[in-house]
Amino acid sequence: MGAFVISRRFNDEYKFVFTSRKGKVIFTSLSYELRFECEEDIERFKKTMDLAKFLKFKGSGGKYFFKLMLDGVHFATSRKYSTELLLQKGIKEITTYACKAEILDFSSNEPIFGDDENSDADDEAAE
């Protein structure tokens, strides 16, 4: 199953990506000023996914990508694909798994797997 991953851009705005079951980024959202706006748009997308439109393009470098449109508004842009078949597989991944995907928030600077200071103390105690 895929996942929506919220993170921060270098300019401190928020964004989210949808990743495949294998962890590859399928699409990246536009920028958001506030984190909860990401969460709201993800939930809105999950509820109205059947209304989404995928506009397919071929870039000047020969790579394929799509723009995800929701309610007639540009919602997200896909990664670049080397073939049209891989692009279609990316779209299929979204339509199959996005409605059930969990939301992961990596936008804070807090440690994810515990307290760094405690792990240093544990390392010293192990020596």
Image (cartoon, rainbow, N blue to C red):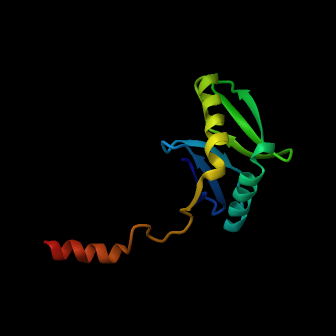
Q: Is residue 112 left or right of residue 75?
A: left
**Could you say which quadrant of the image residue 63 lies in?**
top right
Q: Is residue 70 above or below residue 82?
A: below
Left or right, 61 with respect to 111, comes to: right
Exactly how many numbered labels are in the figure? Answer: 0
Residue 106 seen in render: yes
Residue located at (71% from left, 34% from top): 66
Q: Nearer the viewer, residue 60 or 114?
A: 114
Q: Quadrant of the C terminus?
A: bottom left
Residue drawn at 57 percent across, 64 percent down: 107
- Left/right of residue 56 with respect to residue 78 in the rendered view: right
Name of the residue lying farthest toward the right = 72
Where does the image place residue 117, in percent across and percent down from the top left? Answer: 33, 77
Left or right: 84 with respect to 51?
Answer: left
Q: Could you say where residue 45 lies in the image, as x and y percent from the top left? A: 74, 52
Give the x, y percent position of residue 28.
65, 47
On the image, which quarter does residue 96 sit in? top right
* Residue 5 visible: no
Q: Residue at x 61, y 35 (%)?
A: 90
> Is 49 in front, or is 27?
49
Is residue 29 shown above or below 7? above
Front position in the image: 124 or 96: 96
Residue at 61%, 48% (x, y): give it.
18
Pinpoint residue 34: horizontal percent, then vertical percent. Answer: 70, 67
Q: Most extreme residue toward the left, as rendered?
A: 127
